[in-house]
Amino acid sequence: MSNPNTRSLLGHRGRSLYPVRPVQSPPNRRVNPFNNGGSSSFFSRQTLFVLMFGVMFGYILLPVLLVQHLGFEDLPMQSSLKAMNVRNEGLAALENFNGKRKSFYQEGTTTKYQSRRILSNDDAANDQDADERTPPDLPKEEESASVDSTTTVEVSAEEEDDPAKEEKTEKTVDSVVTVSDEVALVSDEEESDSNGPQSMDSAISFNTLNDIEKRIVEDRDILSRQSIPTATSPTVMKTAFLADHHRKKILVTGGAGFVGSHLVDKLMMEGHEVTVVDNFFTGQKKNIAHWLHHPNFSLVVHDVTEPIQLEVDQIYHLACPASPPHYQYNPVKTIKTSTMGTLNMLGLAKRVQARMLLTSTSEIYGDPKVHPQPESYWGNVNTIGPRACYDEGKRVAETMMYSYRNQNNVDVRVARIFNTFGPRMHPNDGRVVSNFIIQSLQNKNMTIYGEGQQTRSFQYVSDLVDGLHALMNGDYDMPVNLGNPDEYSVKKFATYIKDMTKSKSEIVFLPKSQDDPSQRRPDITTAKEKIGWEPKVAVKEGLEHTIAYFSRVLKEAGEIIPTGPGAAKPEA
């Protein structure tokens, strides 16, 4: 007989396969609280709901019962009674004060009432000369209830009778406030309707903080309309106010340098918002320190070889070392500044649709075969010489400017700058003017590299700034020479500076520098006809200002060693 717990399927020789597991009923998960043999749970679901509701109701009801039991419902009444008591005490104190005040005015004595209010010298003098009468000293309790916390009362009988002490007090206190017979602190009508100590506070009011705030606002207003005098820029320059639709956002790269800082001065005085971008390789922060406080001025320490995102209307691109020792110190960086820096600024001008001016150089003419040099002259440049990093870099920059104009309709201007001098020149830049002045002021040998027959043309920095401004805001977009046609031989120029400084220096001739141009003089016909510009400052007048500047710099430094013709890193 087969096993009932086995399946009907029979295997080989009648043996049963796969024994059937006993059938088990599913467990009963319902909890029966009255069945001790069931689950161990003590409460049913309904009982838990009742308990939770009771606890919540207790939390709500308990504070109400406590308030009723402790009598806190009478608190508003108690507060009202306390306020009435305070008011009555204040009225009593005021009546006591008025009685003393009347007797005080009848006696005709004079005392001084001190505060911390700031007065000018004229106001203090008027207060001292006037008839001064103030209420007598109050008790401490009445004083704390009657006088504001920012005012102090220090009056004693000895100080009233001792004139020496009164004199000393007038010198040491911040200010003196007097009350005369004609001025009453509180009128009789106000006494009957006042609320005690509050009427006293309103009668004796001092605007100490307001006066200080007004002074701060006035100072900020003054500083927002002018520059701050510094050792480098001692002259105060006023800034004009322009309406929003006339005020421009102007970017000046290399704005902390010699020419750039003077250009910033002109733009700031016109009332524009000026942003200077400089990495301070040759620029100096002291050249623009007099504008750092001004709300229209911003300084960004940045290298133009890296892109920058700004919103501007005009771009003056001056960033690049310009003196031979400085641009020869790192020729690769000089080329990158002239090319990649110009490329980044052109990209910015294209994006924001800004007009861009490039300060090119007369060095693109090289050692010229045409004299004087017009803008149409293509130049004579050694592409692999020590000056090529600067010469060729500027030539490529000009090519980029006009490529962007022709292809992307960027509004461009190009200025070819000739030798420039003036205050804020770097004393170690190795240029002709700075070297001669520094050497002559220290009675050191004035060095000329070569025979001194090479010629140069020198313009004062203010004339150059005017030319850059006129070119940027004019309609002419081809290259323009900016320089002074007055031509000097280097030897004659050294003698001229020696005579002006009354120096005992001797002129020394050293070997000529490689690729040093033999002659340099601009043809400024285009500048006169197209932008209406020509130099106005005579060389002698400009040298007087420059010599005075270097005299101050030399006085600060003690000694300055001029830079030679070779490559040199700019010194601070």
Image (tube, rainbow, N blue to C red):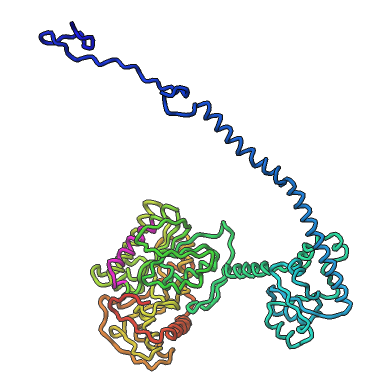
Q: Residue furthest top?
A: 1
Q: Position of residue 192 (x, y in %)?
A: 87, 61
Quadrant of residue 69 in the image?
A: top right
Q: Which residue: 65% across, 42% down?
A: 63
98 left or right, relative to 29:
right
Instruction: Pick whichever, 10 or 139, lies toward us.
Output: 10
Magenta stretch, main secondary structure, is helix
Q: Which residue: 43% across, 70% down?
A: 256
545 left or right, relative to 175:
left
Q: Residue furthest right?
A: 106
Q: Is residue 485 magenta?
A: no
Q: Position of residue 36 (x, y in %)?
A: 43, 24
Tag count: 0
> Which stretch is magenta?
327-346
- Relative to 345, is 77 above or below? above
Instruction: Pick whichever, 515 or 518, lies toward us.
Output: 515
Viewer can see residue 380: no
Q: Position of residue 572 (x, y in %)?
A: 38, 77
Instruction: Pick whichever, 551 or 263, lies toward us.
Output: 551
Q: Position of residue 357 (x, y in %)?
A: 42, 62
- Relative to 88, is 485 above or below? below
Q: Is residue 342 magenta?
A: yes
Q: The N terminus appears in which quarter of the rendering?
A: top left
517 left or right, relative to 105:
left
565 left or right, relative to 474:
left
Q: Residue furthest front?
A: 36
Q: Which residue: 23% across, 69% down?
A: 384
Q: Residue furthest bottom?
A: 504
Viewer can see residue 166: yes
Instruction: Pick whichever, 254 or 71, lies toward us.
Output: 71
